[in-house]
Image (cartoon, rainbow, N blue to C red):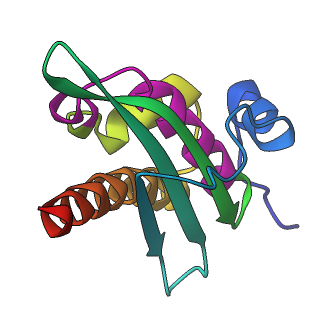
Amino acid sequence: MVQRPYYSKKVIERFMHPRNLGVIKDADGVGKVGNMKCGDLMELFIKVEKKKNKEVIKDIKFRTLGCAAAISTSDMICDLAKGKTFKEALKVGFQDIADKLGNMPPQKIHCCVLAQQGLKAAIEDYEKKKKSKK
């Protein structure tokens, strides 16, 4: 008998009904990451605005090709980063994502790390584009 991994209700809900799924056509930054071992591919799109001389993630969307854990972690990182400065958003760790989602099989924690890397890549892409405009 094959034992199925146990997912929390939050993981299943985010997988079945993601809140932040989509593409921002005129995104200020795009983070593309993947895990060659499991085949998950993530793209995170950020829209940035200035508030009180600080850059804030105004909007964030994702598109992910992967398992339930990959999709739910992509969706959750969007909620955790939206409205935050880059410094605040980069403090969101993989464990924060896992804690917000609840039960995640240990072999799926890498999806939380991948979402964290996707956000970092989107911010780095934004900063690179900003520098090239100067």
* Whether residue 64 is situated above or below residue 41 in the rendered picture: above
* Whether residue 119 is situated above or below residue 121 in the rendered picture: above
Our reading of the magenta stretch's main secondary structure is helix
Residue 67, x across and y down, in percent: 72, 62
Residue 99, x across and y down, in percent: 45, 27
* Whether residue 51 is situated above or below residue 35 in the rendered picture: above
Q: Is residue 119 left or right of residue 20?
A: left
Going 73% across and 35% down the picture, which residue do you hit?
14
Q: Is residue 78 magenta?
A: yes
Going 50% across and 52% down the picture, which residue do you hit?
27
Camera-nearest residue between 9 and 133: 133
Q: Quadrant of the C terminus?
A: bottom left
Q: Is residue 132 magenta?
A: no
Residue 122, x across and y down, in percent: 36, 57
The span shown in magenta is: 69-89
Residue 29, x across and y down, in percent: 39, 56
Most extreme residue toward the top, as rendered? Answer: 52
Going 55% across and 53% down the picture, which residue do you hit?
26
Camera-nearest residue between 48 and 84: 48
